Image (cartoon, rainbow, N blue to C red):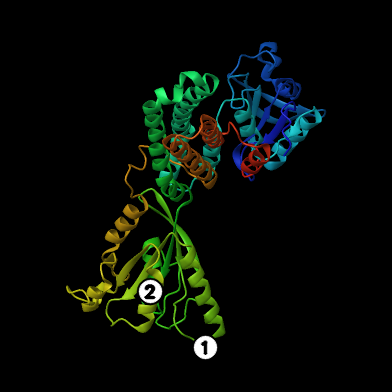
């Protein structure tokens, strides 16, 4: 979308459908004038007209067209800069029917407002300096959040935790860049040599912080998007039963007939505040059935895409060739061996467990639920494990931020190498400038307009 900040924009800010309340939001230099032309305060009191009412006070009245009142509403004016966009904003709280909201929207457009594009209110908040790009992305993440941990991380990001971390790193790099610039301007003083220890210390500190952010990027994405978990195994080992047990409902069909599951079945579940995207797959075996072979191919594709594979083995039977094949296929990725049918084993694990060669494993019974808590605890701990606490530090939560942080780390690494090699100050300055630009891209200070458009196009209209 083209950035047209001079327009006054309007949109329905609540989800489509029927509800108790629906909100029409305007933002821009003419927002108050347009809303004032549509709104009649109860009793016609002049001091309650929107053009005269004090900021952030809700007023009761009616929205009218040429034929008379169309809805009984509450309206609130938020004058710049004390608003979400730092422009004049008016919100009209109507009854939540789409006909009413659409009529109010059309009346506003008839008075000169323009329909907002997806994410345009938050884009204006970003362009007007109310939020940085990480905070703007956090707004979208909060709206789409499907887990308690994901919401908590988004709230922390909205409060500026990642922004503050990046700005601190930028400050360190900028100080080094200033010393290097002084060395270029006054070569006879040999500024860089005189401050070599300070420069090295600052660059080392920045490298360490960036390494920590990048190490946590995978966890940040998992918290935000959820953990993709593929449940795999040969037929009749209890994959669908395990899915049903984890979901606490009978979602997948369970029979003793091999090949019952012909396609992947995906469901989501909350686990300790973390969202899991569970994928039940077709039993993997050799078969001549063309339809079943297609299901098996999809199973392998789901396994390859997953963050974590749960390899389900039948603890009441010897390991088959198909089990060993799957052991090999999952060895190269994050996986957990789930030994099912513990209810048939008594107190002794199967003898072949010694052949797992140290691979992590848990014993469960998908029928009785035994071992389920241990399985869930292992998944939760694995997803959030790392050298640093998960929620006590800034987290990178998407690929755009991660790529920019990686570029910054590479640039700072090159600067560090240039310093140690005694290369010219001009080369050192180039690497530092590249690092500053990459850090600026994380928070939106050096982000191209086309990328901004792609980011905000993912938002809902009205936000």
411 or 358, nearer to the observer: 411
Identify which residue is drawn at 46% across, 67% down.
Answer: 303
Identify which residue is drawn at 63% across, 40% down.
Answer: 456
The quadrant where residue 213 appears = top left
Judge depth for marks 2 and 1 and give the one in front.
2
Checking the image for residue 328, the label placed there is 2
One can see residue 394 in this view? no
Decide which of tag 2 and tag 1 comes sooner along the chain. Answer: 1
Residue 155 to residue 349: above or below = above
Residue 229 to residue 100: above or below = below
Distance between the Cα atoms at labels 2 and 1? 23 Å
The quadrant where residue 33 appears = top right
Image spot of residue 383 (x, y percent): 37, 53
Checking the image for residue 288, the label placed there is 1
Element at label 1: loop
**Mark 1 surroundings: few (<14), some (14-19) or many (≥20) residues within 10 A:** few
**Mark 2 surroundings: few (<14), some (14-19) or many (≥20) residues within 10 A:** few
């Amino acid at each position: 979308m083209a950035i047209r900040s001079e327009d006054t924009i309007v949109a329905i800010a609540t989800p489509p459908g029927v509800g108790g309340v629906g909100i029409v939001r305007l933002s821009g230099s003419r927002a108050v004038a347009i809303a004032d032309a549509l709104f009649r305060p109860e009793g016609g009191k002049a001091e309650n007209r929107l053009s005269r009412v004090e900021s952030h006070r809700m007023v009761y009245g009616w929205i009218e067209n040429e034929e008379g009142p169309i809805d009984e509403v509450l309206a609130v004016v938020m004058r710049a800069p004390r608003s979400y966009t730092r422009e004049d904003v008016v919100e009209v709280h109507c009854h939540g029917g789409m006909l009413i909201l659409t009529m109010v929207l059309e009346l506003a457009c008839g008075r000169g407002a323009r329909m907002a594009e997806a994410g345009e209110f938050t884009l204006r908040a970003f362009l007007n300096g109310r939020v940085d790009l990480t905070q703007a992305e956090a707004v979208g993440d909060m709206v789409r959040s499907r887990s308690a941990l994901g919401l908590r991380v988004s709230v922390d990001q909205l409060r500026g935790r990642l922004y503050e971390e990046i700005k601190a790193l930028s400050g360190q790099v900028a100080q080094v860049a200033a010393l290097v610039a002084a060395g270029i301007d006054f070569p006879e003083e040999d500024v860089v040599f005189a401050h070599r220890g300070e420069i090295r210390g600052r660059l080392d500190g920045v490298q360490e912080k960036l390494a920590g952010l990048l190490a946590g990027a995978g966890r940040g994405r998992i918290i935000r998007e959820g953990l993709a978990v593929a449940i795999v195994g040969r037929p009749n080992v209890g994959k669908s039963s395990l899915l049903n047990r984890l979901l606490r409902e009978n979602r997948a069909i369970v029979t003793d007939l091999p090949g019952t599951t012909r396609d992947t079945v995906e469901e989501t579940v909350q686990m300790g505040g973390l969202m899991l995207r569970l994928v039940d797959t077709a039993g993997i075996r050799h078969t001549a059935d063309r339809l079943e072979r297609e299901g098996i191919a999809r199973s392998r594709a789901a396994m390859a895409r997953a963050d974590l594979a749960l390899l389900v083995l039948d603890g009441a039977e010897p390991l088959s060739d198909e089990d060993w094949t799957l052991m090999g296929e999952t060895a190269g990725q994050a996986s957990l061996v789930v030994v099912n049918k513990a209810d048939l084993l008594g107190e002794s694990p199967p003898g072949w467990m010694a052949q797992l060669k140290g691979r992590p494993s848990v014993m469960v019974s998908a029928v009785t639920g035994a071992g389920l808590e241990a399985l869930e605890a292992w998944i939760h701990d694995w997803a959030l494990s790392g050298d640093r606490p998960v929620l006590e530090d800034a987290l990178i939560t998407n690929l755009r931020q991660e790529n920019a942080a990686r570029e910054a780390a590479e640039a700072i690494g090159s600067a560090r190498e240039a310093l140690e090699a005694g290369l010219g100050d001009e080369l050192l300055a180039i690497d530092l400038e590249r690092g500053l630009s990459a850090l600026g891209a994380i928070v939106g200070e050096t982000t191209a307009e086309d990328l901004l458009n792609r980011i905000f196009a993912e938002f809902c209209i009205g936000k």
